[in-house]
Amino acid sequence: MAYAYDDQNIFAKILRGEIPNDTVLETGHCLAFRDIAPQAPDHVLVIPKGAYVTYDHFATEASDAEILDFARTVGRICDMLGVSPGDGGAGYRIIANTGANGVQDVPHLHVHILGGRVLGRMLPKAG
Ligand code: 5GP
């Protein structure tokens, strides 16, 4: 695995405090903040603090503590947003756009947590 991490990406700047963000939750290894251009009433990004480009990069090279914190943080955000079906919420979607085919704009791993409205089909049907 050969990922080169660009430390000038916008989320790296947010993590360094060079750009403000609307933080929802900060943990030892993660930051969760509202997307600047929300595509649903609830739209939160969860990122690891470590320099990982994609989910597969993170899953392969991150420590167990980082991976556990990331997974728990996603769960805590769903809880905080009130979207978990297990607690009577109406549900949500988690997306990790990756690479060129995934149309990833920011090369620092992030998952989008979207909720607050019906989100439609995952992908348009192939033509
Ligand atoms: P991607 O296409 O890489 O999955 O999504 C990147 C996301 O980052 C987009 O939804 C975009 O609105 C969001 N974004 C880009 N720049 C900023 C920023 O400076 N602050 C915040 N909070 N979100 C950003």
Image: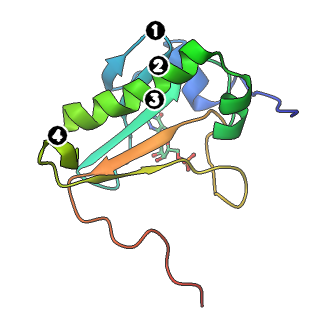
Task: Where is residue 19? Give x, y as percent.
Answer: 48, 21
Q: Secondary structure at mark 4?
A: loop
Task: Where is residue 48? Give x, y as percent.
Answer: 54, 23
Q: Residues within 10 Å of mark 3 (few under 14, many from 20)?
A: few
Mark-to-mark CA distance, 2 and 4: 20 Å
Give amino acid for label 2.
Asp
Mark-to-mark CA distance, 1 and 3: 13 Å
Give amino acid for label 1.
Gly
Q: Quick check: is the Cβ at mark 1 less than 8 Å away from ligand 1?
A: no
Give amino acid for label 3.
Ala
Work out whether mark 1 precedes mark 3 in sequence or the reverse, and give the earlier one. 1
**To which residue does mark 2 refer?**
69
Q: Contact (CB < 8 A) between labels 4 and 3?
A: no
Q: Residues within 10 Å of mark 1 (few under 14, many from 20)?
A: few
- The quadrant of the picture occupied by the C terminus is bottom right
- The quadrant of the picture occupied by the N terminus is top right
- Of badges 4 and 3, nearer the viewer stands 3
**To which residue does mark 1 refer?**
28
Q: Contact (CB < 8 A) between labels 2 and 3?
A: yes
Work out whether mark 4 precedes mark 3 in sequence or the reverse, and give the earlier one. 3
Outermost residue on the front side: it is 86
**To which residue does mark 4 refer?**
82
Mark-to-mark CA distance, 2 and 1: 8 Å
Mark-to-mark CA distance, 1 and 4: 23 Å
**To which residue does mark 3 refer?**
71
Q: Nearer the viewer, residue 48 or 9?
A: 48
Task: Where is residue 29? Give x, y as percent.
Answer: 50, 14
Q: Decide: is 121 above or below 116.
A: below
Work out whether mark 1 precedes mark 4 in sequence or the reverse, and give the earlier one. 1
Mark-to-mark CA distance, 4 and 3: 17 Å
